[in-house]
Image: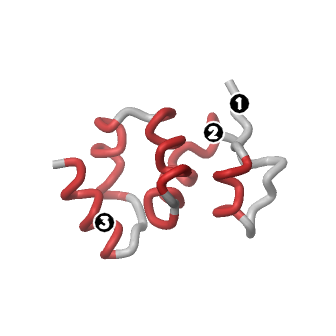
Amino acid sequence: MSTILPSRVKKYFWGDNLDELNWSQHKRYISQTLLDKGDVKSVSWLLDKIDLDQIKEMLPSLKLSQKSLNFWRLYLS
């Protein structure tokens, strides 16, 4: 299933072609971007789409700022 991103999330993908960006094909990239740059509303949307265990599993390989990485490590521990 291809899920189009809601408008509250799209603002974080200003350099991407939003017609081609969708959840089913770009889950990892979308998660990485929102975990690093997202606000409360966009992260809330993400957490409705993906399980915390999946985020824990992906976390070591995501390219996040050190500040974001530290936050998510603490949050998920």
Estimate how packed mark 2 is, as few (under 14), some (14 to 19) or many (20 or more) residues with alpha carbons within 10 Å: some
Q: Position of residue 45 (x, y in %)?
A: 54, 41
The image quarter containing residue 61 is bottom left
Q: CA distance from mark 3 to mark 2?
A: 22 Å
Placement of the N terminus among the 4 image quadrants: top right
Which one is in front, 55 or 43?
Answer: 43
Q: Secondary structure at mark 3?
A: helix
Task: Give the residue drawn at x 73%, y 38%.
Answer: 4
What residue would you read off at disc 1?
Answer: 2
In the rendered view, tell whether residue 28 sits above or below residue 33: above
Label pair 3/2, CB-CB below 8 angstroms: no
Label annotation for residue 69: 3
Q: Secondary structure at mark 2?
A: helix
Task: Give the residue drawn at x 28%, y 45%.
Answer: 56
Sooner in the amino-acid sequence: mark 2 or mark 1: 1
What residue would you read off at disc 2?
Answer: 23
> Amino acid under label 1?
Ser
Label pair 2/1, CB-CB below 8 angstroms: yes
Q: CA distance from mark 2 to mark 1?
A: 6 Å
In the rendered view, tell whether residue 50 sits above or below residue 36: above
The image quarter containing residue 47 is top left
Estimate how packed mark 3 is, as few (under 14), some (14 to 19) or many (20 or more) residues with alpha carbons within 10 Å: some
Task: Give the residue drawn at x 31%, y 75%.
Answer: 66
> Amino acid under label 2?
Trp
Question: Across the whole image, how many numbered discs are drawn on residues?
Answer: 3
Q: Position of residue 54 (x, y in %)?
A: 35, 37
